[in-house]
Amino acid sequence: MVKDVSRFANTAWAEMWIPYTAGTEYNTYWSEGINGHFNCCVLLKEGVTEEELRREVQSRIAKFNSTLSDCKADIGYQPNSQIVEWLNGGNEGKADMAGAFLRYGIILFILLLVPAFNLSGITLSRMRKRIAELGVRRAFGASKGNIIGQVLFENLVFTLVGGLLGLCFSYVAIWLLRDWLLVTSLGDAGLSGGMLNGYVFLAAFLFCLVMNLMSAGIPAWRVSQVNIIDSINN
């Protein structure tokens, strides 16, 4: 008996587990028994690094190869983490993780740059409608830093409210569209706690928060530079 997981974890989910030697894919006649259609997943112990595991595996392979006569086992630069395996397309060589993260980072930056400009324009338009209000605040002693802080704080509140509403709506949407979203090649996955990853939501929320503050920072600075008399007359 093993702990149940979501069907989306296709390398960890199964309705029944059997010894690999009982499967039809197991054949000891292929390359002295070292070749076949199998994948191995390893869960690292706490405190053990991937490099330590890789060295241990290589030493075991070298010891195993000493018992073979015609063939030698070689798994390349493995084992790899799940994200490396995904980015490397299943190849056994060493993945260029720095290059992959750079490519995806550039794509993500470009995709978010346009919304950031749109947010900046909307914020600037909203601030221009409040120039008279901000001018009165300046006349009563508010500094430019106070004005910028007020605008950034307002955008922070909007981001918090929008993030919480988005989280609630996403849960409701998953539940309403579960017959469409939660169907995999292995069958109906159903709702499970493993789908609700708080770290992913927190990372996305912090990223949106930074983008929101950056898009609001420039309009706030521009509004704070307007002369007090011009602001009040406006």
Image (tube, grey):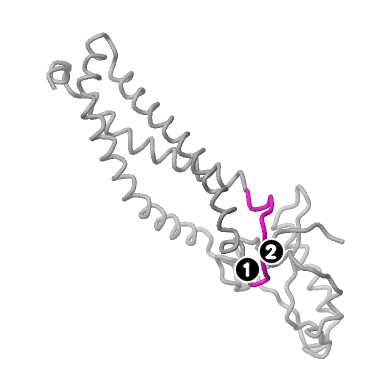
Q: Amino acid at mark 2?
A: Arg
Up-down relation of residue 39 to residue 159 (above or below): below
- Relative image position of residue 79 (x, y in whole percent): 69, 66
* Label 2 CA crowd tier, 10 Å (few <14, some 14–19, many 20+): many
Q: Residue at left 75%, top 69%? A: 40
Q: Quadrant of the C terminus?
A: top left
Q: Nearer the viewer, residue 61 or 43?
A: 43
- Relative image position of residue 160 (x, y in whole percent): 47, 34
Q: Was residue 139 drawn as part of the magenta stretch in this picture?
A: no
Q: Which residue is mark 1?
A: 184
Q: Which residues are magenta?
A: 184-196
Q: Is residue 96 left or right of residue 16?
A: left
Look at the numbered discs 2 and 1 and tell me whether their residues touch, using CB distance below 8 Å: yes
Q: Which residue is mark 2?
A: 7
- Relative image position of residue 83 (x, y in whole percent): 60, 60
Up-down relation of residue 100 to residue 212 (above or below): below
Q: Residue at left 29%, top 39%? A: 120
Q: Is residue 86 left or right of residue 113?
A: right
Residue furthest to the top in view is 140
Q: Residue at left 77%, top 48%? A: 46
Secondary structure state at the residue bearing disc 1: strand
Residue furthest to the front in view is 176
Q: Residue at left 82%, top 91%? A: 29
Work out how far the residue at label 2 is from the one at label 1, CA to CA, in angstroms: 7 Å
Q: Quadrant of the N terminus?
A: bottom right
Up-down relation of residue 124 to residue 132 (above or below): below
